[in-house]
């Protein structure tokens, strides 16, 4: 049976209802930094257990409680979480990680390299340039991880509001 992990990043204090809808029903949520404010984590925590790391824009006493990296175990898979992939200071495959989750760039991407899945969910916060607003879902079966980007249709949601 697959376990599903919702992945979100770069909310910058904005909790979009479309993001919550896309993450509903997951077994766990990972926030890859630039949370913006603790209310974001509270809203996500109402859906599933949350693991969050601190991003470069997360400041204040609440943010200091967030680690800069985290390890999330799902089934037999270990996921390594940090905000900025450029700050990765280990070799994920050698360390036994099935996936590396990072945000920061606001560019959604999923890429396999050397047996490790690299996941950037993009940004679910305020739109930046013409980049899509997105989250990701990881499907974990045993030690295998596959991912999908879920682009949020925020224009359609506003038109129907």
Image: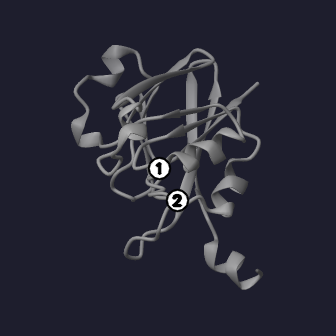
Residue 25 lies in quadrant: top right
From where the camera sits, is residue 54 visible?
A: no
Check disc 2 and report its element: helix, strand or loop. Answer: loop
Residue count near mark 2 (Cα–Cα under 10 Å), binned few <14, some 14–19, many ≥20: many
Q: Nearer the viewer, residue 15 or 62?
A: 62
Q: Residue at x 49, y 62 (%)?
A: 125
Q: Nearer the viewer, residue 92 or 105?
A: 105
Q: Nearer the viewer, residue 93 or 29?
A: 29
Residue 7 lies in quadrant: top right
Query: Which quadrant is the C terminus positioned in?
Result: bottom right
The answer to whether 103 appears left or right of 22 in the picture is left
The answer to whether 41 appears left or right of 82 in the picture is right
Going from the N terminus, do you reach mark 2 or mark 1 first? 1
Extreme residue in the bottom direction: 159
Q: Are marks 2 and 1 in contact (CB under 8 Å)?
A: yes
Q: Position of residue 18 (x, y in %)?
A: 67, 62
Count of numbered labels shown in the rendering: 2
Number of the label disc, if any, that sits on residue 9: 1
Residue count near mark 1 (Cα–Cα under 10 Å), binned few <14, some 14–19, many ≥20: many
Q: Residue at x 40, y 15 (%)?
A: 96
Which residue position is annotated with label 2? 124
């Amino acid at each position: 049976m697959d376990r599903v992990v919702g992945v979100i990043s770069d909310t910058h204090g904005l909790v979009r209802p479309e993001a919550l809808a896309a993450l509903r029903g997951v077994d766990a949520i990972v926030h890859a930094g630039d949370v913006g404010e603790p209310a974001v984590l509270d809203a996500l925590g109402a859906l599933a257990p949350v693991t969050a790391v601190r991003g470069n824009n997360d400041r204040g006493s609440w943010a200091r409680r967030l680690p800069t990296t985290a390890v999330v175990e799902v089934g037999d898979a270990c996921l390594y979480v940090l905000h900025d992939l450029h700050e990765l200071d280990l070799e994920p495959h050698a360390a036994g990680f099935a996936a590396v989750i990072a945000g920061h760039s606001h560019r959604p991407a999923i890429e396999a390299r050397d047996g490790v899945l690299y996941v950037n969910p993009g940004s679910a916060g305020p739109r930046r340039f013409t980049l899509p607003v997105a989250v990701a879902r990881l499907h974990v079966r045993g030690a295998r991880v596959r991912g999908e980007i879920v682009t949020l249709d925020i224009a359609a949601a506003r038109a129907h509001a």
